[in-house]
Amino acid sequence: MTLPQEFHEIAERVNNWGRWGAEDETGTLNLVTDEVVRGAVAEVRTGRRVPLALPLTHDGVQTGVIPGRVDPLHAMTQINQELFGPGTVACSDDMVTLGLQAGTHWDALPHVSHGGRLYNGRPASTVTAHGGAEFSGIHRVPPVVSRGVLLDVAGALGAERLPGGHAVTPEDLERAEEFGGVRVRAGDIVLVRTGQMRVYLGGDRHGYGHPSPGLSIRTPEWFHARDVAAVAGDTLTFEIFPPEIDGLWLPVHALHLVEMGMLQGQNWNLEELSTACGESGRHAFLLSATPEPFAGATGSPVAPVAVL
Amino acid sequence: MTLPQEFHEIAERVNNWGRWGAEDETGTLNLVTDEVVRGAVAEVRTGRRVPLALPLTHDGVQTGVIPGRVDPLHAMTQINQELFGPGTVACSDDMVTLGLQAGTHWDALPHVSHGGRLYNGRPASTVTAHGGAEFSGIHRVPPVVSRGVLLDVAGALGAERLPGGHAVTPEDLERAEEFGGVRVRAGDIVLVRTGQMRVYLGGDRHGYGHPSPGLSIRTPEWFHARDVAAVAGDTLTFEIFPPEIDGLWLPVHALHLVEMGMLQGQNWNLEELSTACGESGRHAFLLSATPEPFAGATGSPVAPVAVL
Amino acid sequence: MTLPQEFHEIAERVNNWGRWGAEDETGTLNLVTDEVVRGAVAEVRTGRRVPLALPLTHDGVQTGVIPGRVDPLHAMTQINQELFGPGTVACSDDMVTLGLQAGTHWDALPHVSHGGRLYNGRPASTVTAHGGAEFSGIHRVPPVVSRGVLLDVAGALGAERLPGGHAVTPEDLERAEEFGGVRVRAGDIVLVRTGQMRVYLGGDRHGYGHPSPGLSIRTPEWFHARDVAAVAGDTLTFEIFPPEIDGLWLPVHALHLVEMGMLQGQNWNLEELSTACGESGRHAFLLSATPEPFAGATGSPVAPVAVL
Amino acid sequence: MTLPQEFHEIAERVNNWGRWGAEDETGTLNLVTDEVVRGAVAEVRTGRRVPLALPLTHDGVQTGVIPGRVDPLHAMTQINQELFGPGTVACSDDMVTLGLQAGTHWDALPHVSHGGRLYNGRPASTVTAHGGAEFSGIHRVPPVVSRGVLLDVAGALGAERLPGGHAVTPEDLERAEEFGGVRVRAGDIVLVRTGQMRVYLGGDRHGYGHPSPGLSIRTPEWFHARDVAAVAGDTLTFEIFPPEIDGLWLPVHALHLVEMGMLQGQNWNLEELSTACGESGRHAFLLSATPEPFAGATGSPVAPVAVL
């Protein structure tokens, strides 16, 4: 079994291999130039900061369906321990075990491969248990600070949230641009809101994951045409799930991560941001969302902040 | 044994309990107002982004001296796994176990107690194995975006790095202000560079930890007077170690975290930033350094970014 | 709120504090003398070995109801890694994170306290995040090899499994002795079969945990009278759950672990053993069930083996 | 580069592939028949039980040299937590993260491969991050109870411990048989004592690991000739390290695990056992050493017990 012809045709059109050199490990984040950052900073009006991460708890969005992807397990290794003797200053320390793709996170480029290849044509075999990803691991990601744009598709369509079967199309994205009075440009980080996070926030972890609205296989070309630097969303699966084309699983992952070399983010909480943008009437802002540099990792939790 | 009188006198002068209400869990980060953030944004000139985190590796700064504080242990749970059948898009997933105070991190306020008390007078017993810190856990920290100021003490004193026994004094901090042509103001996040990180970067993990230059017990009053929002440094212990006053261990931790309610950061890599500020002649910038919101945790890794 | 009078009366009758000295950390395992072991060995007839542990998998008996008690999470740190160069012998290594009470396990004596006390009157405060249990940690448990006796209560009552609300009484235990043609004696390790494990083995993890048959608050006196060394069972909660007396949670835990100083085991798979004992007509055997000596731990997985 | 001819010649002579059928995952443990177990039980004289495991502590035998093989990290998830309300019975729970080959352990057969093959000719590629070892994982190991024989090579040679460069030969093993007045027979589990454990117990973790005495490449043929069921030792590397033949790393691992399908154990503490056998004048005993059944794992901690 191989991926269908339709996939390969899109893949060819959005492919960025070699665009920033044969040695590149950074992909579309190359589009975030100093100039782009200055433009991002220029979007700040009030100084209001909106956090976009879910709390990292053992009761997070994972339900055990994806083997090994565990919500954070937190434990104390010291509690008010007077390390230097009775009556001295006391310390509490803790540790955590977590799946790196469990909560609000970025997928690193080597999180996905197809046909034995990673971004920029690297062999998939360069991901090993011994050291993780040799190329484009999350620790190779430069600071993620750029202009953020909220494409509030749910808002634009007048829905509290999109239904499970809704594939977000380029037309939806453009409707959201219009709704937000903003136009996506090169180097932007696009946040696509479906409203699906409300299901999780309402207490239904299973319903949150599946079925889920999400990006259509047609959107990578749109992001490619706009030279977007990264995309994040408010669902578990990022793209529509189950998929649009029977038997073609995770095509958007493969197009973004492998073909385009574009970071993608999942489980971002865009609810407060949606309200804030609605109040201010402005859907562009300064976004700061640098992952933790776990060496060789294929993903990382992130605590993104929008500064409006 | 109890803490000496000298400690208690300083504690009384810098104490912020009740300053932002009896229910406050945020401490000096209350000083980061929207206006402060607008001022921070106004510092950006070029758009250059400088990362301040060390890679999170099993070969990090911990040496086993602090029980339970382990460098990240990374392992793969999926490698190019064709989850949906042969020939489909393949996924790699990973997990990590780490001490939350192991690498480049923020200490949350309940990381330290003295006399059975945490910030704002909460009982130390509110930190438990069951859920961690009930108050002021790292997940309660709001977005950390403010003006950052590099106080390059090593640079100001013309040293590659300060010697192990050097306690950084308020006079040193003011010399660094002068050196950087900047004045610390309310809401700023101050980064104090001793150059000690060079020892670790040079391959000597044990020498990095101990003996270490670091903040003097006299500095909290200076930070308090300036209404600083948070302080981070480039050493393992943050304050001078071994301590200035025989038998008085970790007094700066206790003053910052418990009395003032001020986040403090350790193991920040300020080397590239020092060079960048030297080149631009400007030691103030936009700093983005939001911790990961581990529920109930007394600290978190952070991937800070300075935007110049 | 305190524990009811009924509990305290039983506690007084079964209390073993001081019985083996004020310094004792071993409790009823002191009853396993060399002579008892020789008697245990003398029970072996065929040499057939029956394993009693469930596999340690991420899909184990835990359902997330007990915070922090996680089924094992396994991950590879090396896969066929040619550590010494291409073409050399290749190694695979792995790691695991698990709750020590998650699968087939022994509870160590300090797993439970009541009224601020542990076994032998130690203060409960001797269990800390820094080092775990100072006294009677699982690493202090001597080799657990003794005569095992299967009390097949389900078998004796002609049931495939006892219903959820069935509290196993001393009368039930004696009926099982009669059924098995065996009499429990000093130093024995008693395995009580309810058949509840069939619910888990049948695929119903939630139904397995709750409601559950299990030991009645009346059984500790019986175990005490017989000078049993340890007791294990085939349920998640060991004792009947929800409890017999409204509001009196985990009384059998408190009586066994705190008052008697007796190890107790949960989630033991007694199905194959039940069949084997039925076939041989003998319900006594050599039992080997030494926990892993995790320093300071309040429990440990165990892979018990019955030799018939 | 490939393994030298000498290795392949030995491999051919000791190979057990197909001996117990093409589907076999158990290897030489097939040699432990019911009759062997009855013979093992018959060795018990006094009932004395000797534990052979080191405590599982964060300060164990690992030094960080082997990536990912971490000593156990223990943390509390509950401490005297009154889960059902104030004044109720209180519980303490804990969790642990550890490398499965970190302490006293068994290597499972798929721990090593060479030439792309595992025991019984299975492809090495059947070990994956997704589920670990598909064949012969440690959870497939049947109960390990058999006759144990201590071959006290250090004792036989009149040494407190063998020097680092000492390769234990078949002649050494036979001298130890003579010293112990015992002859190894089919189905036995052989424990080879070098005395190297004294280095670790004396506080020198680094010296313990390297250089180390251990089994010579000539011993697998001897074990094969005697139809030994398993072999364990008191060193980190099991076989002599650095190796006897320049550039031929871990040949004994490959011969035992891949060619013979024989479990091997490391870091067993044989000091008390050596004394006990010396006192009793008997070097054969009942050995119980069943690993924890971690699903898909390539090794497991074990708490072995010798019953004399």
Image: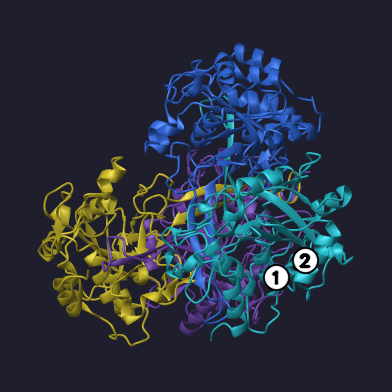
Chain colours: A yellow, B purple, C blue, D cyan
The numbered disc on residue D173 is 2
Assess whether mark 2 and mark 1 are in contact (beta carbons under 8 angstroms): yes
Identify residue for label 1: D219
Q: Quadrant of the N terminus of chain C?
A: top right
* Disc 2 chain ID: D
* Disc 1 chain ID: D
Asked if residue C292 shows in the view, the reply is no
Q: Residues within 10 Å of mark 2 (few under 14, many from 20)?
A: many
The numbered disc on residue B190 is none
Q: Residues within 10 Å of mark 1 (few under 14, many from 20)?
A: many
Q: Which residue sits at x=27%, y=54%?
A: A235
Up-down: is A94 above or below D197? above
N-term-proximal mark, 1 vs 2? 2
- Identified by mark 2, the residue type is Leu
In the rendered image, which quarter is residue B221 located in? bottom right
Judged left or right of residue B3, residue C199 is: left
* Residue in front for this viewpoint, A203 or C168: C168
Q: How many marks?
A: 2
- Identified by mark 1, the residue type is Thr
Asked if residue A253 shows in the view, the reply is yes
Q: Are marks 1 and 2 on the same chain?
A: yes
Q: Which residue sits at x=57%, y=23%?
A: C180
Q: Position of residue B289 (x, y in %)?
A: 45, 63
Q: Quadrant of the C terminus of chain C?
A: top right
Q: Position of residue D61 (x, y in %)?
A: 70, 61
* Residue in front for this viewpoint, A111 or C219: C219
Q: Position of residue D74 (x, y in %)?
A: 61, 50
Up-down: is C167 above or below A87? above
